[in-house]
Image (cartoon, rainbow, N blue to C red):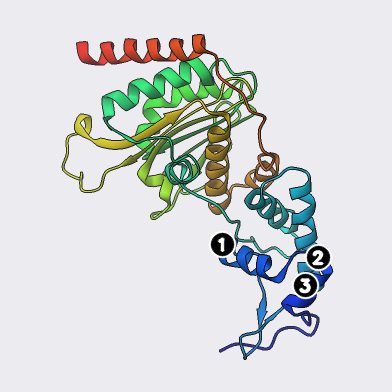
Amino acid sequence: MISDPPAEADLSIGDLATATGVGAATLRAWERRHGFPVPHRLPSGHRRYDQAQVSAVLDVVRRQHEGVRLEAAIAATLVDAHGSDGNRPMVPGERSVFAALRRRHPQLTPQRLGKPMLLALSWAIEDEFCSRALAPHLFGSFQHDSYFRAARRRWDDLALGARTSAVFADFNGGEDVVSLTGPARVHLDAGAPLLREWAVVCDDDDLPAVLTAWELPGQGHVKEADRLFDAVWTVDRRAARDAARACTRAAYDAGAAWAPGLLQDLAPEPRAVQVDAATQTALFNRVLAYVDRQVRR
């Protein structure tokens, strides 16, 4: 049953358009694509808005004028409003690194890779990018607690120089754990997209890199070394930022206390940067060395 909107919600979508300078058709498109602004509904189905939504739309417009893209501006505005009534607003955007890269960077063609190759590529990115970046935002998705335990020593070291470091898995204990000596551990409930993904994300001004891989379904009885993934990787700066945003939104959904502030930090578009050929060659050489080591076992 549709309840009556509060008395202060007396603005039509036309009134909201007039008050904010954003056309009614644009507001409807924002609502359809991003779930914002959220109207109160009359029994007739007509939208009604209050003054808080006027302020929110104006805030989004201000952020856009500062160069923030629409989706990031909406997310930052909703996070700014968080805390006034204890409710967690639903933040728009991808919660899947793989989906974010495939949707926003369609030029990245997935490659069908086995687990040994993914391990080699992950280690190479961690060594050539994550460990050398000055103050990166680092994220890793490990699917299961046991997989993270096998990599914990590496990630404890990587976290020492990171501005942000967090890892995702179905951790035992089911809670966000902030460690003084390692990355924050974010527990993911069943159904979270990142539980199906393998990801290494280094969001850095000079050494950006991201690897993400989606595990093919139906491999419950496949030997560990034979697991297959569709993988994409890149050293594109904007792709790394999109991946970092997706990880932060997943952490936000999981209730991580640090996620709202980081969503705001990641809202601006990064400056364009081209990773030099020498660094890319070093990454490729490192991958070859790790693959060779895997083959020799």
What's under tag 3, amino acid-wise?
Answer: Leu
Residue 112 percent coordinates (x, y): 27, 34
Of residues 291 and 83, the one drawn nearer to the viewer in this rendering: 291
Task: Tell me the tag on residue 286.
Answer: none
Residue 92 percent coordinates (x, y): 58, 56
Is residue 249 positioned above or below 296 on the image?
below
Q: CA distance from mark 3 to mark 1?
A: 18 Å
Marks 2/3 in contact by CB < 8 Å: the verdict is yes
What's under tag 2, amino acid-wise?
Answer: Thr
**Residue at left offset 55%, top offset 40%:** 242
What's under tag 1, amino acid-wise?
Answer: Arg
Left or right of 67? Residue 72 is left
**Residue at left offset 63%, top offset 69%:** 28
Dot 1: few (<14), some (14–19), or many (≥20) neighbours within 10 Å?
few
Of the two numbered discs 3 and 1 on the same chain, state the one appearing first in sequence.
Answer: 3
Left or right of 297? Residue 8 is right
Of the two numbered discs 2 and 1 on the same chain, state the one appearing first in sequence.
Answer: 2
Task: Tell me the tag on residue 16.
Answer: 3
Q: CA distance from mark 2 to mark 1?
A: 19 Å
Residue 297 appears in view: no
Is residue 221 positioned above or below 128 on the image?
below
Residue 270 percent coordinates (x, y): 66, 33
Task: Tell me the tag on residue 20.
Answer: 2
Residue 144 appears in view: yes
**Residue at left offset 46%, top offset 28%:** 234
Residue that mark 1 sits on? 33
